[in-house]
Image (cartoon, grey):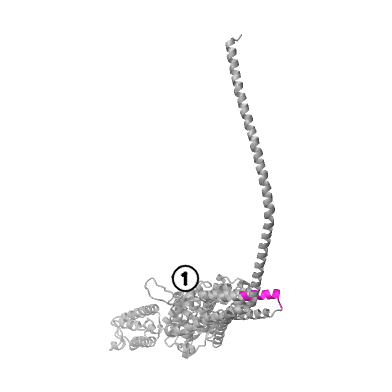
Amino acid sequence: MIPTEDASARKREIEEKLKQEQETLSFIRENLEKSDQLTKGMVSILSSFESRLMQLENSIIPVHKQTENLQRLQENVDKTLSCMDHVISYYHVAKDTDRIIREGPTGRLDEYLACIAKIQKAVEYFQDNNPDSPELNTVKARFEKGKELLEAEFRSLLTRYSKPVPPILILDAISVDEELEVQEDIVLEHLPEAVLQDIICIAGWLVEYGRNQDFMNVYFQIRSNQLDRSIKGLKDHFRKNSASSGILYSPAVQTKRKDTPTKKAPKRPGYDHDLRVKHHSDALTEKHGAAAGKDDVLDIEIDSYIHCISAFVKLAQSEYALLTEIIPEHHQKKTFDSLIQEALDNLMLEGDNIVSAARRAIMRHDYSAVLTIFPILRHLKMNKSEFDTTLQGTAASTKNKLPTLITSMETIGAKALEEFADSIKNDPDKEYNMPKDGTVHELTSNAILFLQQLLDFHETAGAMLASQETSSSASSYTSEFNKRLLSTYICKVLGNLQLNLLSKSKVYEDSALSAIFLHNNYNYILKSLEKSELIQLVTVTQKKAESSYKELIEQQIYMYKSSWHKVTEHLADRNMPVFQPGTKLKDKERQVIKDKFKGFNDGLEELCKIQKGWAIPDKEQRDFIRQSQKKVVSDAYRSFLQRCANISFTKNPEKYHKYRPEEVEEMIERLFDTSA
């Protein structure tokens, strides 16, 4: 059982908590009642606010709609006014642009094009909206006038600022300096930049809006004329400067040698400047009575033509670069073709004239004319690929002009080579034309000089000969094939020369002089072949050519020495009397010895007198022959004197013993010395 006190305490505690809970419940009820009252008040306020908003909306929306309508009406009015102003402005375009159109575009191209644009828009408006209005005709006329003035300005700018390229700049652009590892690329500026931009702008407008291609004809005519004048100016530069100084120097490019800082002439484009044409043609044309200075003029013309070919390529490339900025792409090739025709035709005509001149010279048997063909032909073939690249896209007739000229030159050159070989074979044996001293014949020196020129242009000459071949083996025209052809040709010329010299040698009555003549010519040929490296080309088809000439030279030396047999035969033991020491010779025996002395003395004097006037230009050969002959004669003479030393065959020995061995040697030493 629970004690009573504890139960009472527990009861009081529960009653107290219950009382507190009741109080809390009463507090919550009071608050809920207050909250319900507040909610009812808020709902009443919101209901009143909603009612007022609906009243405001009903009042504002009609006003807003009226305002929106008014704004739309205002905008329509503004647009209408703007359109009216725009339309009215078309009626005033002709008047507003009259002054600017009449004064032209010079100096204010942008402003002028802006006026043209206004006129163009006016034309479009009247065409679309009022095609029968007089205003359309007015603005059309004004547009055409503006277009005409733009075309005139295009022509004027091109004419005024297109100038021939100065020769100095052309030479700088085409010159090749072998000492410079990287070649400086010279840019040819044909028009000032500002002018060029105006021309480009006008051309663009004429294409897009003017619908006129006449300006392209104007362009190629003006630029064609300047291209031709540039090349002619270069020719005149050559004639004037080469004639006065012989040197063409371009001060725009400073080039220095490693040893000295002196200036030098620009080199011929693509290869060595010195063609050595003049040196060879001097010798070859001398017998034809060529006037002094003729070859100098010819040399200048050749040099000028070669430079003009290179100048044409460089200028044409530059013109095409300029053209691409001005002419529409689909008209560029045709316009370029027309632009270069005059200058190209003039160059080809000049080339044809060179071929014709060479043909006439060959008909006169002046084969030196072929020398003018070689440097030109080589240069044309060297530049053909660049030429073809430059003319890419032009008409077939334009592209074929250079190959046609090359073919003509190869044909006439090959003909000259063949006729030259025949002329060497058939050169007549004229007695008055033979060298009296047995030295080198003019025919030999001319032939060798000609062949040396072929060596300078061996590739060109080989290709020239190959161009005339019709055999299947010639179809490829390889370098090796061309080389063999040229070697065969050179051997043919040398063979013809050898036969002709042998025939000419028979003109001499003295067989010894004939031998000296052949010796000199054979020796000259061999030395020239070795010195000029022609021998390397000859041995391509004749391996033993060098040894063959040496054998021929030795044969002629042997033939010459035979002429001394009539002198030394008097010193031989034949018919020499046999005697015992102290025995007196018979008169007949004494006479034999006297005749031997006399025969030797007379023969020696006669030969020395005759042969002293002969010539052996080669000092080495001259000394060899002298020494060889001196030894033979001196040894025989000393032996003879020794045999006759103790023989008393005359009371006046000095009459027969006229010369000491040393004096005989001195006499032989003076042989072939025309100055003695």
Classify mark 1: helix, strand or loop: loop
Q: Which residue is mark 1?
A: 184
Residue 239 vs residue 1, the one in the foreground? 1
- Exactly how many numbered labels are in the figure? 1
Q: Is residue 120 magenta?
A: yes
The image position of residue 504, as x and y in percent, is 49, 86
Is residue 486 something one can see in this rendering?
A: no
406 left or right of 65?
Answer: left
* Image quadrant containing the N terminus: top right
Label the magenta part by its dominant secondary structure: helix
* Image quadrant containing the C terminus: bottom left
Three-letter amino acid code at the position of disc 1: Glu
Q: Is residue 416 magenta?
A: no
Residue 558 vs residue 90, the one in the foreground? 90
> Which stretch is magenta?
117-131
The image position of residue 451, as x and y in percent, is 50, 78
